[in-house]
Image (cartoon, rainbow, N blue to C red):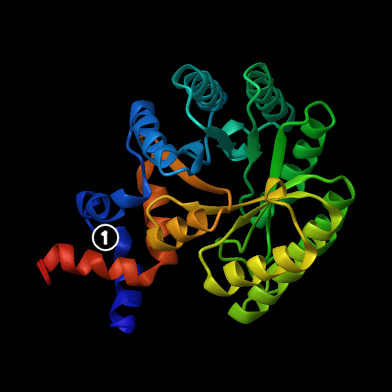
Amino acid sequence: MNLLNNLIVGTLPFVPKQIVAKIAGRYIAGATFPDAVKTVQQLNSIHAMATVDVLGEDIFTKDQATQSRNASIAVLNGIAENRIDSNLSIKLTSLGLKMDKQFCIDNTNAIIETARVHNNFVRVDMEDRTCTKATLEIYQTMRSQYERVGIVIQAYLHRSEKDIRTLAAEKANVRLCKGIYNEPPEDAIKDYKGIQDNYLKLLRILFESGCYVGVATHDDVLINGAKKMIVELGVPKERYEFQMLLGVRHETRNSLIAEGHRLRVYVPFGKDWYGYSVRRLKENPQMAGNVFKAIFGVGQ
């Protein structure tokens, strides 16, 4: 079945969107902000926090980037109005990073200023390696002006240890994840255990430095490694949280909450759901196998 799942992943571009929507719907709150609010309220009811993301990465005009900025500002206002426990995640490509860096900085500043007004927090997501340097530079610009802003580091990149040590010295708020983009071996670790080992190495640096850390993983090896490290180093619960994607590993999520760990769920919404859905299915070939079942009625 693994071979079949991998074959299905390769044919995803040819699968009707309605089939992808049926299978990947668990990963997405919906098309509108009220959908996201409902999802966050459900998460809050089980003592999970959230981070909301308006779906849509690369844009091609400044008008599109402005619309993306305004959508993020509206989300922050909506979070405050609805009194839900959530912050905001943003991707700089959706704010014009690849068109005009200063324009992107201005858009990012407007979003983080709105978060400041509401005493909320903005997480600057990391994208593929072509964006890493500029994303870190813009994050540093924002961090020099605002406290409630954080960054994401991908453990599979060779450069990440250097970046982590710089951020650790500043006691940055860091979400540490494995990384999902298909990068070349000169830029990224390619073997699974190598990525796991580097993740735990970077996590230790962050914990030992006193950073606030978002431990973003669904990997049992990393979850258990993080828990052992937390006990070993005496990391207080106020200095870390586990982070997971919407729709993934509910039992593990609920167990972490029951054990008393802070936990945040990534809640994406928006009309640009298709690209995000395909990426999630590519990351999880077993889930992609459900596409086969949906098309042919297997096991229905």
Q: Residue at x 83, y 51 (%)?
A: 210
Q: Residue at x 69, y 76 (%)?
A: 197
**261 shown above or below 54:** below
State left or right for residue 61 relative to residue 28.
right
Q: Residue at x 28, y 79 (%)?
A: 4
**239 shown above or below 159:** above
* Residue 158 in view here: no
Which quarter of the figure has residue 206? Answer: bottom right
Which quarter of the figure has residue 217? Answer: bottom right
Residue tagged 1: 14
Closer to the camera in the image, 81 or 279 = 81
**188 shown above or below 30:** below
* Quadrant including the C terminus: bottom left
Q: Position of residue 205 (x, y in %)?
A: 81, 62
* Residue 284 in view here: yes
Closer to the camera in the image, 225 or 68 = 225
| Amino acid type at mark 1 | Phe
Q: Residue at x 35, y 76 (%)?
A: 6
Q: Position of residue 107 (x, y in %)?
A: 65, 24
